[in-house]
């Protein structure tokens, strides 16, 4: 039986008249690398902060390894929330920030953290105000990873880091996860970049959970069939269709099922071109119902 790291039951969060989270219930597995995916404003940051005990929920319950992180000090020391720009004093030097982490987190690996910062050319003698956005992201990421907390929550942690350094960051993240297994929840706008290191994916939209699935299941969740409008309409009749789109140069449909499933084989037999839908596109198709229609007015006479 799989151990549950984070138990989230009917969690709601309201800010005045706005609902950030609307009854999310999910059991997050232990020792997995989980991608928390959703558009801006979908509730990702709010959910992570509630899990870390940094934000009060309006209703519902959150338990980390069976305990309330806001009341249990031992569990609190095993949870780290980090983002690209934490509110630390601009006058502090990087070395002083490492001392804070060393005091606050019992498993903090100061030597490892220093090595990561050295790899990226960041001096411990630099003050926060001297850092670029990318360097700030690297400092906060390095410190969070070095805590080796059982639950590590990385919230858009790679903003401002250039592509070559991001590749190194992903390698470091995956290697350290393998060396020191724990639950890492990673929210990012670059799903296509990180999907290769993820074990599972949690998709939320407008404060509600869409699904929580293993990455292999996400890759087999949908397929796309391309053809002319008449062929697509005929084939999709009676099928589990997510969307049908008519374009200037052809039409396509996105349907439930894998590219090797029965429906996809039927599509091929009908002469349609069949292709897999990437996890990034799965998240788009399942949360967008009127693709392109909001642009039509730009060319109205």
Image: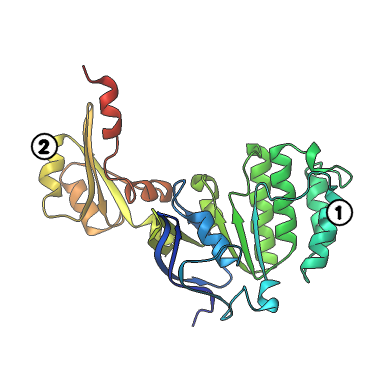
Residue 107 horizontal/vertical position (percent): 77, 70
Q: Which mark is residue 46?
A: none
Viewer-proximal residue among 94 and 224? 94
Residue 232 horizontal/vertical position (percent): 16, 41
* Quadrant housing residue 184: bottom right
| Residue that mark 2 sits on | 230
| Residue that mark 1 sits on | 96
Q: Is residue 249 left or right of residue 15?
A: left
Which label lies toward us, 2 or 1?
A: 1
Identified at 64% across, 38% down, the residue is: 160
Q: Is residue 242 left or right of residue 190?
A: left
Residue 269 horizontal/vertical position (percent): 17, 48
Q: Residues within 10 Å of mark 2 (few under 14, many from 20)?
A: few
Q: Is residue 235 left or right of residue 26?
A: left
Residue situated furthest top in the rendering: 301
Q: Is residue 92 above or below residue 70?
A: above
- Label 1 sits on a secondary structure element that is helix
Viewer-proximal residue among 54 and 82? 54
Residue situated furthest front in the rendering: 16
Identified at 38% across, 59% down, the residue is: 208
- Label 2 sits on a secondary structure element that is helix
Query: Which is more N-terminal, label 1 or label 2?
Result: 1
* Quadrant housing residue 263: bottom left
């Amino acid at each position: 039986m799989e151990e549950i790291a984070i138990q989230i039951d009917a969690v709601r969060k309201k800010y005045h008249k706005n609902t950030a989270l609307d009854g999310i219930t999910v059991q997050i597995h232990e020792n997995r690398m989980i991608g928390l995916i959703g558009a801006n404003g979908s509730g990702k940051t709010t959910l992570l902060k509630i899990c870390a005990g940094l934000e009060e929920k309006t209703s519902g319950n959150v338990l980390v390894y069976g305990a309330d992180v806001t009341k249990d000090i031992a569990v609190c020391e095993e949870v780290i929330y980090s983002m690209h720009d934490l509110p630390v004093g601009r006058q502090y030097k990087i070395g002083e920030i490492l001392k804070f982490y060393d005091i606050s987190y019992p498993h903090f690996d100061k030597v490892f953290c220093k090595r990561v910062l050295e790899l990226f050319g960041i001096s411990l003698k630099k003050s926060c105000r001297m850092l670029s956005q990318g360097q700030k992201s690297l400092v906060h990421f390095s410190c969070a990873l070095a805590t080796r907390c059982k639950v590590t929550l990385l919230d858009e942690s790679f903003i401002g880091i250039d592509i070559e350094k991001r590749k190194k960051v992903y390698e470091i993240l995956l290697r350290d996860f393998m060396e020191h297994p724990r639950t890492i929840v990673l929210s990012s706008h670059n799903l296509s970049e990180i999907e290769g290191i993820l074990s599972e994916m949690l998709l939320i939209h407008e404060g509600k959970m869409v699904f929580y699935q293993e990455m292999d299941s996400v890759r087999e969740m949908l397929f796309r069939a391309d053809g002319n409008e008449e062929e697509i309409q005929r084939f999709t009749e009676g099928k589990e269709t997510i969307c049908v789109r008519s374009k200037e140069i052809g039409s396509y449909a996105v349907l439930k099922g894998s590219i090797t499933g029965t429906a996809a084989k039927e599509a091929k037999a009908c002469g349609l071109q069949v292709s897999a839908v990437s996890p990034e596109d799965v998240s788009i198709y399942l949360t967008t119902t009127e693709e392109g229609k909001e642009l039509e007015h730009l060319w109205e006479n």
